[in-house]
Image (cartoon, rainbow, N blue to C red):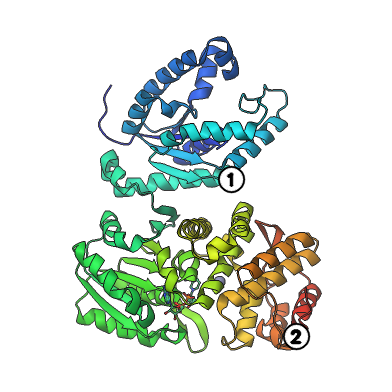
């Protein structure tokens, strides 16, 4: 057999119930490649269901057949191969597969697997029950068997957590992985791809212009230079930061980058939203001109969302676009502002009026930096994290509910998981609708229609953005309930979660007219209808443009009168 060290195939594996076969099929369709499922092939060749082969001929016979089929498949090119959950345990199979393809392992929690298998069995009662379910305590059995295989699954090139994702969403992720590796491994050289395969990648963002990784981890700043080099960034660096962040992390980051061989300059601006202006963009242009920055030089945004928006705007416009890297240091920036490529500055007449879509080359979030973020900023950031769960991921909401204390105490492992998942949700949405043209990105506005009104009505002075969003989410959920979309128990659940994270869920001091005027509801009646993002369930948002004004006014009146809800 000829093995030339090139990636010719994509292999999808994982435990039963992770959807590998359906995912692989969809990936093959997406890439226009051939598809092979080793289990199906065995059934075809023997004319017997797998359960029967195991029972009549024994596992060894099954594994032998599997080995042969895998051997043959690895000689193919452009093939998406779904392999059974046990196949990768065999060292001979693993070696062959690893040499010729990228192995993607689909992960899911035992509870998810149990639920999926159970649902599958219930929907096709005529087929024989899987052996995994035909025991006294299937969940326990799944946990045990999965634990014994975990070390083999860990050898995969890439792992995708499928809990809460649909088959097509997982397939999209696999295709993104393939595109990313192809980009960083010219000629599909497996060795080069291997060096880019990185366990710190929380998710990938793919848009028409760019595909880039979002790294999330604890103490990850130390690896910034290394990750940038892997992403083929090699120019001189200008760090843009604000005084608060730079005084804490500036010299550390400069040191790390210099150690990695980069030339580094820093430009530090005052903290605060007023700095996100054309005036400061011009000051940065002046600095870049003075330092003779070139097109391959790199801008690093080191700070919160204000810095990300400002530095990104400069990166988008200076020399018609320079490479740039986001190093978000606030919770809002990590899970929201750094992902999606919206960059810009404020105009005296309105926030974010001047801007562009300009994607970074990579995002690196070191959750440890949150230990110095002021408490109120941190709390405000949790609103966006909770929002991501509420609109798209019920399991993530459960995770947040069960770990409030650990998360608010910034326990590294839990914090990293929460931020990685929240960032991945945002990444998934913006990958589907980079420029907010198809309406998919609209669901990120959950809680924001009212929040923007509250912020405007209080001249952006009273609330931090996340605080207003928390109040807006409570109202949007109430509106959903009023329209018969959402049970009251879910409204209460959301409210309880927001409160546990220390977020406000109501307030007093604004009248109904002030709120409606700020929301421009009076103008909206004549013009375009508001696209309300509402909830159908925890983890399931819907967009509705037909919400009667009377219902909106009713939930706003409650807010203005600050009735205990
Ligand atoms: N581009 C987008 O998609 C997007 C999305 C959401 C928000 N935004 C923008 O982001 C901005 C809000 O972001 P933000 O909340 O991060 O505000 P911010 O950048 O102003 O940061 C808030 C405060 O925290 C400080 N800070 C940041 N990280 C710190 C750390 N690790 N330790 C100590 N202090 C730290 C900052 O100096 C600042 O005083 C707004 O301008 C908003 O428009 C953009
Ligand atoms: Zn927001």
Q: Residue 564 occupies which quadrant of the picture?
A: bottom right
Image x and y of residue 479, in percent: 75, 69
Residue 368 vs residue 527: left or right? left
Residue 108 appears in the figure? yes
Quadrant in which the C terminus appears: bottom right
Residue 204 vs residue 118: left or right? left
Q: Few, some or many C-alpha atoms within 10 Å of disc 2 (few <14, some 14-19, many ≥20)?
A: some
**Residue plotted at (53% across, 31% down):** 145
Q: Residue 108 occupies which quadrant of the picture?
A: top right
Residue nearer the viewer, 322 or 367? 367
Q: How far apart are marks 2 and 1 (CA)?
A: 41 Å
Quadrant in which the N terminus appears: top left
Residue 399 vs residue 338: left or right? right
Residue nearer the viewer, 550 or 17? 17
Residue nearer the viewer, 68 or 51? 51
Image x and y of residue 496, in percent: 69, 66
Which residue bears the numbered disc 2? 512
Which residue bears the numbered disc 1? 166
**Residue plotted at (55% across, 37% down):** 18
Q: Few, some or many C-alpha atoms within 10 Å of disc 1 (few <14, some 14-19, many ≥20)?
A: few
Q: Earlier in the sequence, mark 2 or mark 1?
A: 1
Secondary element under disc 1, as helix, strand or loop, is loop
Image x and y of residue 118, in percent: 67, 34
Image x and y of residue 472, in percent: 66, 73
Secondary element under disc 2, as helix, strand or loop, is helix
**Tally of numbered tags:** 2
**Residue plotted at (48% across, 77% down):** 374
- Above-or-below relation of 239 to 181: below
């Amino acid at each position: 057999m000829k093995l030339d060290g090139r990636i010719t195939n994509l292999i999808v594996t994982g435990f039963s119930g992770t959807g590998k076969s359906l995912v692989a099929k969809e990936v093959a369709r997406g890439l226009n490649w051939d598809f092979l499922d080793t289990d199906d092939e065995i059934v075809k060749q023997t004319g017997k269901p797998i359960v029967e082969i195991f029972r009549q001929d024994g596992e060894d016979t099954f594994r032998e057949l599997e080995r042969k089929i895998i051997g043959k498949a690895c000689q193919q090119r452009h093939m998406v191969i779904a392999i059974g959950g046990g196949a990768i345990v065999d060292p001979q199979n693993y070696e062959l597969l690893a040499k010729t393809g990228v192995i993607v392992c689909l992960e899911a929690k035992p509870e998810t697997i149990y639920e999926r298998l159970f649902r599958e069995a219930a929907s096709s009662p005529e087929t024989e029950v899987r052996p995994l379910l035909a025991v006294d305590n299937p969940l326990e059995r799944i946990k045990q068997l999965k634990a014994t295989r975990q070390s083999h699954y860990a050898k995969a090139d890439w792992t995708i957590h499928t809990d809460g994702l649909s088959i097509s969403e997982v397939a999209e992720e696999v295709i993104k992985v393939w595109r990313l590796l192809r980009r960083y491994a010219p000629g599909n050289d497996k060795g080069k791809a291997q060096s880019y395969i990185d366990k710190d990648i929380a998710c990938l963002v793919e848009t028409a212009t760019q595909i880039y990784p979002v790294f999330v981890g604890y103490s990850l700043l130390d690896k910034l230079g290394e990750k940038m080099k892997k992403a083929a960034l090699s120019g001189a660096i200008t760090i843009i930061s604000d005084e608060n962040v730079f005084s804490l992390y500036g010299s550390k980051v400069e040191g790390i980058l210099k150690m990695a061989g980069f030339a580094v300059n820093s430009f530090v601006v005052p903290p605060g939203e007023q700095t996100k202006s054309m005036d400061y963009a011009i000051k940065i242009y002046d600095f870049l001109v003075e330092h003779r920055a070139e097109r391959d030089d790199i801008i690093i945004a080191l700070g919160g969302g204000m810095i990300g928006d400002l530095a990104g705007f400069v990166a988008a416009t200076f020399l018609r676009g320079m490479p740039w890297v986001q190093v978000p240091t606030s919770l809002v920036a990590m899970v929201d502002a750094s992902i999606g490529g919206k960059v810009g500055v404020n105009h005296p007449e309105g926030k974010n009026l001047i801007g562009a879509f300009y994607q970074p080359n990579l995002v690196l979030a070191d959750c440890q930096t949150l230990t110095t973020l002021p408490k109120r900023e941190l709390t405000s950031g949790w609103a966006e994290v909770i929002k991501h769960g509420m609109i798209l991921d019920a399991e993530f909401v459960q995770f947040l509910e069960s770990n409030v204390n650990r998360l608010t105490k910034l326990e590294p492992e839990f914090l990293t998981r929460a931020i990685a998942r929240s960032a991945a949700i945002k990444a998934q949405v913006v990958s589907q609708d980079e420029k907010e043209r198809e309406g998919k990105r609209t669901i990120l506005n959950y809680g924001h229609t009212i929040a923007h009104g509250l912020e405007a009505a209080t001249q952006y002075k009273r609330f931090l953005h996340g605080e207003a969003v928390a109040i807006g989410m409570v109202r949007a959920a109430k509106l959903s309930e009023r329209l018969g979309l959402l049970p009251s128990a879910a409204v209460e659940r959301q409210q309880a979660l927001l409160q546990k994270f220390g977020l406000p869920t109501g307030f007093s001091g604004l009248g109904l007219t002030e709120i409606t005027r700020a929301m421009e509801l009076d103008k909206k009646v004549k013009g375009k209808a508001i696209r309300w993002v509402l909830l159908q369930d925890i983890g399931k948002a819907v967009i509705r443009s037909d919400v009667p004004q009377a219902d909106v006014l009713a939930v706003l009146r409650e807010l203005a009168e600050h009735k205990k809800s």
